[in-house]
Image (spheres, grey):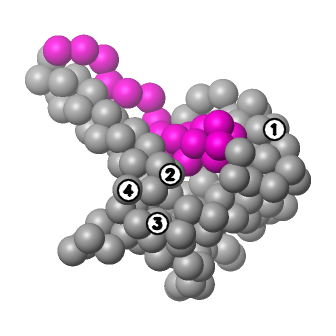
Amino acid sequence: MPVMALAVQAMKSATQQFAEEFRAAASGQGTAPVGEPHAHAWTALVMNAVTTTALEDPHLKLLSAHGSAMKTPDHILPRIHVCKVKIEKGHVKVYLATKSSPDCLAPAGAAIAHLLKQGGKEEQVQAPRRLVYSAACI
């Protein structure tokens, strides 16, 4: 997946902002961010997908509804277990792992469709325990 893909940049920016806020809170200069870094990366991925017109209508509607329902990172945490961007030597991997229920698998599939439109290639990888679905978009 291209390093400069908009989805990659949005996810990277969200996790960097989370880390900065967390460090600031640890040094007593603010409050800690809510949730976990992967919830913020997922939110950035969904918002990036919704604001582009590259997605086909069913995926766009699905992610729009999902984005509206997931108001805070606390709503995301029980559903999305992994949403991580890893950049090594100019090569990007985006890892997603979700709960196995349809309300999680469908948005994950739509998010993967969005990543594929931006130059990714889907590869199934070993899911963490307790999870049925996991994918790496490369």
Disc 4 and disc 1 in contact, CB within 8 angstroms: no
Disc 2 and disc 1 in contact, CB within 8 angstroms: no
Which residue is labeled 4 in the image?
Answer: 4
* Mark 3 → mark 2, Cα distance in angstroms: 10 Å
Please give the label number shown on residue 94.
3
Which of the marked residues, 3 or 1, is nearer the chain's N terminus? 1
Q: Which residue is pictured at 44% across the width and 29% down the height?
A: 34
The furthest residue to the right:
58
The furthest residue to the front:
53
Which of the marked residues, 2 or 1, is nearer the chain's N terminus? 2
Which of the marked residues, 3 or 2, is nearer the chain's N terminus? 2
* Mark 3 → mark 1, Cα distance in angstroms: 22 Å
> Camera-side residue: 129 or 31?
31
Numbered range of the magenta stretch: 29-52
Which residue is labeled 1 in the image?
Answer: 65
Q: Position of residue 7 (x, y in %)?
A: 50, 51
> Camera-side residue: 124 or 23?
124
- Amino acid identity at mark 4: Met
Please give the label number shown on residue 7.
2
Q: Where is residue 63 in the image (x, y as percent from the top left)?
A: 75, 45
* Mark 3 → mark 4, Cα distance in angstroms: 13 Å
Looking at the picture, does residue 136 appear above or below residue 123? above
